[in-house]
Amino acid sequence: MGGLFGVVSQTDCVADLFYGTDYHSHMGTKRGGMAVRNSQNIHRAIHNLENSYFRTKFEAELGVFHGTKGIGVISDTDPQPLIIGSHLGTFGIVTVGRINNMADLVAGAFAKKSYFSDTTDGRTNPTEVVAMLICQEASFEAGIRRAQETIQGSCSMLLLTDKGVYAARDRLGRTPLVVGRRQDAVAVSSESCAFPNLGFDVDHFLGPGEAVFITADGWEQCLPPGDRLQICSFLWVYYGYPASEYEGINVECVRYNCGAALARTDDVEVDQVAGVPDSGIGHALGYANEKKVPYRRPFVKYTPTWPRSFMPQNQKMRDLVARMKLIPVRQLIKDQRLMFCDDSIVRGTQLKENVQILFDYGARQVHMRPACPTLIYPCEFLNFSNSRSTLDLAGRKVIHALEGSDDKNLELYAQAGSEKNLAMIEKIRTQLHLTSLKYQRLEDLVTAIGLPKERLCTHCWDGSSCC
């Protein structure tokens, strides 16, 4: 997915920028970057994060960064920030999202004899395409409006200028941005969890399509928010950090609600409840508290030397890292009826191995309760599952086995409790060797979040979308 952080301060902002960006490391694992502006120029650094952490790559460079304005990014896509020279002046830019009409935008630029200098793996850098759209207008405000109106998909962005930082949320608000204030500085962040330890208080959640301009003294609205909101529901289920809030709704509280909803619709008797670390923990605590069943940790996560479970980008090595990080506790497994809660089941490959380990260690039963419905539709709006074949999704793989095609009767398979939905879940259960498997109902997930369904993006579960 990715995350953004920007800050404008009355004094040097480098420490705030460094730690604020680092607080987004859970949002991506491919690249990180920072750009700081002082009275002379913009200093930029970009590093690959596939085999290390953000902190270890940037700490050595902090001595050469000086300035009162800066932007940072954790990216799962292209190298950022970019530094752009234009009639608007020299500015830095970082983006998060997905541009579905990239080919058309690039072809249109080539037809006008434009060119792109920054390519990644032979592809045009999406952030440079956004910069191109902005530079086609006479002001940053007009350029941001043009970009948001032209881009199909989603794109939230920060622009580092000589006077301050522009922050713009994508047109339908699929990714969040929030402004924080401190006596001597103003910051903007994808994740509100970046604020407390840096001394910032949440001041304003940007609405869909809203753009603001921040200085050390405050912020002002440049573009008003639109009426339609389609924020990604998966932020609360998985991507978001427990201490973060979106639309004023805390991630950890939603996960407790999800777990409690799973418990209220469940009649299975178990000896203990556990969460698949880390994002499944909140869901499991909600389940355990609602059921009055002990919460325990039959799997513990070893993190001192292992990066995140979906690092590196190579899938075989990613699976190996995930397996090495989870260590079973035999004394909590033997002769137990175990209930596991997790954020979701995407591919199911690693889960199958973990379930087998539990039975090998003497578990009597292993039950699984994902906090969201079956993933059936690859994401069209963010960089979650968009690079996967549909057959990489456990649900679509089963649909292909049952139908001979992976795109037949998808609406029926997405309908909780339908004959086809139950047949799909039963086949996933047998493939994973689970004693029982029951997914969250979409209506219960929506209730757990607390926003009306029409203000949430639920595309990956039911195929609905608002473009």
Image: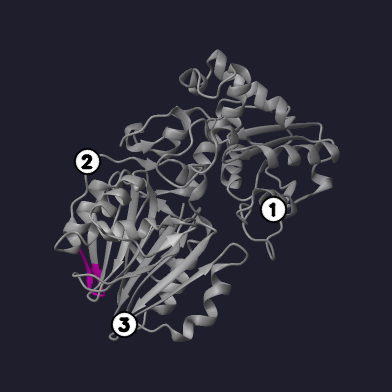
Task: Assess disc 1: are there few (<14), some (14-19) or many (≥20) residues with their C-alpha within 10 Å of its C-alpha.
Answer: some
Count of all numbered marks drawn on residues in the image: 3
Crowding at label 2, few (<14), some or many (≥20) Cα neighbours within 10 Å? few
Along the viewing direction, whichever of 298 and 391 lies nearer the viewer: 391
Residue type, mark 1 in image: Met
Q: Element under label 2?
A: loop
SS at mark 1?
helix
Q: Nearer the viewer, mark 2 or mark 1?
A: 1
- Image: magenta residue range: 214-220
Q: Which residue is mark 3?
A: 41
Disc number lying in front (2 or 3)? 3
Toward the left, the furthest residue is 138
According to the image, label 1 marks what residue?
317
Mark 3: which amino acid? Asn
Badge 3 vs badge 1, beta-carbon distance below 8 Å: no
Give the residue displayed 32% in from the left and 80% down from the top. Answer: 68
